[in-house]
Amino acid sequence: MTKEEIAKEIEEGGAAVGIEFGSTRIKAVLIDSEKNPQASGGFTWENSLADGIWTYSLQEVENGIRTAYAELKADVKQKFGVKLSKLKALGISAMMHGYLAFDKNDNLLVPFRTWRNTITGQASRELTELFNYPVPERWSISHYYQAILKNEPHVPSVEFITTLAGYVHFMLTGQKVLGTGDASGMFPIDANTGDYDKAMAEKFDALAAKKGVTKKLLDILPKAIPAGKEAGKLTKSGAAWLDPDGDLGEGVLCAPPEGDAGTGMVATNAVAPRTGNVSAGTSVFAMVVLEKALSKAYPGVIDIVTTPDGKPTAMVHVNTCTAEFNKWVGIMGEAAKLLGAEFDTGKLYDTILGSAKDGDKDCGGVYTINYISGEGVTDFSEGRPMVVRSQDAKFNLANFMRSQIYSAVGTLRLGMDVLFNENVKIDSMTGHGGYFKTEGVGLETMAAAMHTPISAMETAGEGGPWGMALLAAYAADTKGKNLGDWLESEVFASAQKKTVAPDAADVAGFDKWLEGYKSALKAERTAVENLK
């Protein structure tokens, strides 16, 4: 499409917008009818610790979305010379899980509790045992049940609980709904119905009744809606809430609000069985769409969520990925500057991380443990970053950085081993995030660690907001196709991607290193116990 054609399409209301609330950035992306991103806007924010709870205020939510949308409008005006006043479709996504509880008058009862909070251990354990199904601490139902266990004063007033995406969608449309993928991080979804598991809900109601709670769970959860369905329209008040300038009119079709895991799957074309994606940045998680259910629950290691259209998906989530080696690259940059070197950040990373390519396949006996925080996969409640090596290890820059890069995905691999032992088949995986930026390092290491070809797409760099914009476009016109077929034909048919197959020597080297890494975790446990 020419610039003039895109401008006309935007002016006539043919574009779709996705807005995603990440943990550090809110980003809005506008796509044209060919599904290409054409404009964007953003807002940087940080969670705060208030009375021991990681939270964002609802005022921050409002300020953030307004700023991101205003920047999007300005970008459209600057690039195409037109005012953004009409949209074909709009969609909201956000970091999954957490707890937003409201009373009958839609007043927030307690500050938003984000996924980051680890205050629901008892609830998580009891519900996992009750359902024989993994219920992580960060899930909404864990937060709600923990509040019940603690007899928190707000519990009797709860009439509605939702996620951050669900709250924003409610402000825009007045609809108390949620996309199936995001809903699967609130409460388990029945794979046969695509809705909340009624048998588990009944078990929960019976358990909660013993604590004096009489409200039925399904009456206070948002309605789960699969991708491709309309989830309401932008109201007059919703339009004013988003765009106080008054340029955007009411009536815009809104897609089911989704979680960041679901939009990541869409952005990497990983919604069909036997496909998967790896999001590797500050944290790392892998998603694999399942052909069949796992043989049993693996609490703390494997979460079961769904794709936006309801397919069961195994998720391995690890809290720390690039954060620790980022610190080491920074220290080396400080040293280089003291010696008078001049360089930009990109060259620093490419040089230091790129040195790993010259390291021994097994890192020469150097083991790095990057645990800044605890890790559920290996049952650590806290972390102590450390480097362990024998006296005769080949300790040089290349091996040290290769160990750092291995460590960033070592715990992820331990979680994935559960799926490999379950004989879960993976035909393809797509990677996105900062881990993959250094040429010749990220894709190659991930392929070796996963024993699976790893691809990276050019468009995947737009990430979740682009994925949400795609879901908005899909809701506006599915063309009679399921989500996987629609993505394949309408979005990724001509996508440019690079695929790296696992190298046999790299696989053997990583596996050898991993055995030593597992032994080194014993030292990590001792450090956690003794280094306060």
Image (cartoon, rainbow, N blue to C red):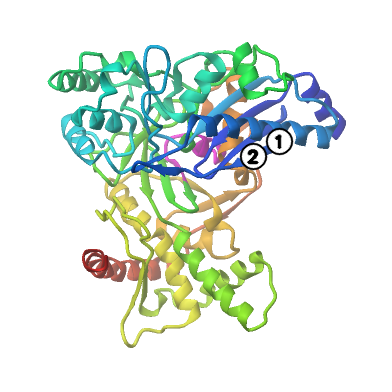
Q: What x and y, as percent, mark residue 295?
A: 22, 38
- What amino acid is labelled 2 in the image? Gly
Identify the secondary structure beneath mark 2. strand
Question: Where, quadrant-wise, is the C terminus in this rendering?
Answer: bottom left
Image location of residue 215, percent across then percent down: 25, 13
Asked if the residues shown at circle 2 and circle 1 are in contact, with their CB atoms under 8 angstroms apart, the answer is yes
Residue at the location (62% across, 70% down)? 348
Q: Residues within 10 Å of mark 1 (few under 14, many from 20)?
A: some
**Residue 1 visible in the shown view:** no
- Quadrant (top left/top right/bottom left/bottom right) for the N terminus: top right
As drawn, the residue found furthest toward the left would be: 210
Determine the residue positioned at 42% across, 28% down. 163
Looking at the rendering, which quadrant does residue 450 occupy?
bottom left
* Residue 126 x/y as whole percent: 17, 34
Q: Nearer the viewer, residue 439 or 99?
A: 99
Residue 78 relative to residue 213: left or right: right
Report whether residue 87 is seen.
yes
As drawn, 181 above or below 431? above
Is label 1 in a helix, a strand or a loop?
helix
Cα distance between the residues tagged 2 and 1:
7 Å
Is residue 362 in the magenta section? no
- Quarter of the view holding residue 388: bottom left
Residue at 65% over, 35% down: 68
Q: In the image, is residue 399 above or below residue 507?
A: below
Q: Which residue is mark 1?
A: 71
Q: Is residue 129 left or right of residue 162?
A: left
Q: Position of residue 185 (x, y in %)?
A: 37, 32
Query: Where is mark 2, residue-wise?
Result: 42
What amino acid type is highlighted by mark number 1? Glu
Magenta stretch: give its range: 263-277
Nearest the camera: 48 or 139?
48
